[in-house]
Amino acid sequence: MRPALDAAVLPADAIEVGRIADAWGIKGWFKVLPHSASAEALFSSRRWFLLPPDRPMKPPRPTASTASNATAAVQNTVWTEPLLLDIKEVKNHSDTVVACAENLQDRSAAESLRGARIFVPRSGFPKAADGEYYWVDLIGLQVVNREGVALGLVRDLMATGPQTVLVLEALPETDGAKPVERMIPFVSAFVDGVDLPGQRIMVDWQPDY
């Protein structure tokens, strides 16, 4: 069923920052599973845009054989468009994040959002401190070592205890071979600098490490 929220237009710079896990309590609060890359954005934004877990590109088009009133009524309940959630409060609770919204009044309303994907505009992220970066800004950057050798593009990042690791994907040297994967700890011992305008990361790392 479609949650009882206002339809919205997804911002052009929208970034997925988490998912709604389940209802929390009886007054419309819900649990959130933040993506570790952008957890701060959940606390800074008061307008969350929601998409269902598996959003189809378009709602199904009725055909002559399925265009009964009953079928049309079912199709109208399909949740496909972005929805707007006006957040009242977000807080840490134990080992999770919980939130409540203006337009959710009870547990049933919160349960209707289970699994929803949360998006906020990138322009709404709080400014990162000097020397800190949002993961979303690092994905896709070219990684180059001190000798000017391109090691690959940042495909993903992993949190491994106290440090973060860049996961790189480089084109294979021979046709038909699988892409080369490299992992470089994102620490000052190996990372010389990040040039966001230039779309690259400079590192002290060799291709055969």
Image: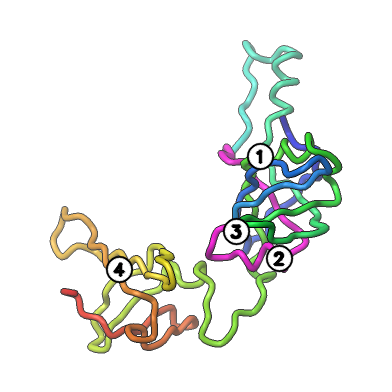
Q: CA distance from mark 3 to mark 1?
A: 15 Å
Residue 4 is inside the magenta segment = no
Task: Residue at 76%, 14% (x, y): give it.
Answer: 69
Instruction: Report the amino acid beneath label 1.
Output: Arg
User: Residue 35: image x %, image y %?
Assistant: 55, 58
Q: Specify which label sits upstream in the sequence, 4 or 2.
A: 2
- Look at the picture and state if 151 lies above or below 45: below
Instruction: Report the amino acid beneath label 4.
Output: Met
User: Neighbour class for label 1 at 10 Å: few (<14), some, many (≥20)?
Assistant: some
**Badge 1 is on which residue?**
114
**Badge 2 is on which residue?**
43
Residue 157 seen in the current view: no
**Badge 4 is on which residue?**
183
Q: Specify which label sits upstream in the sequence, 3 or 2.
A: 3
Q: Specify which label sits upstream in the sequence, 3 or 4.
A: 3
Q: Between residues 93 and 87, which one lies in front from this camera angle?
A: 93
Q: CA distance from mark 3 to mark 4?
A: 23 Å
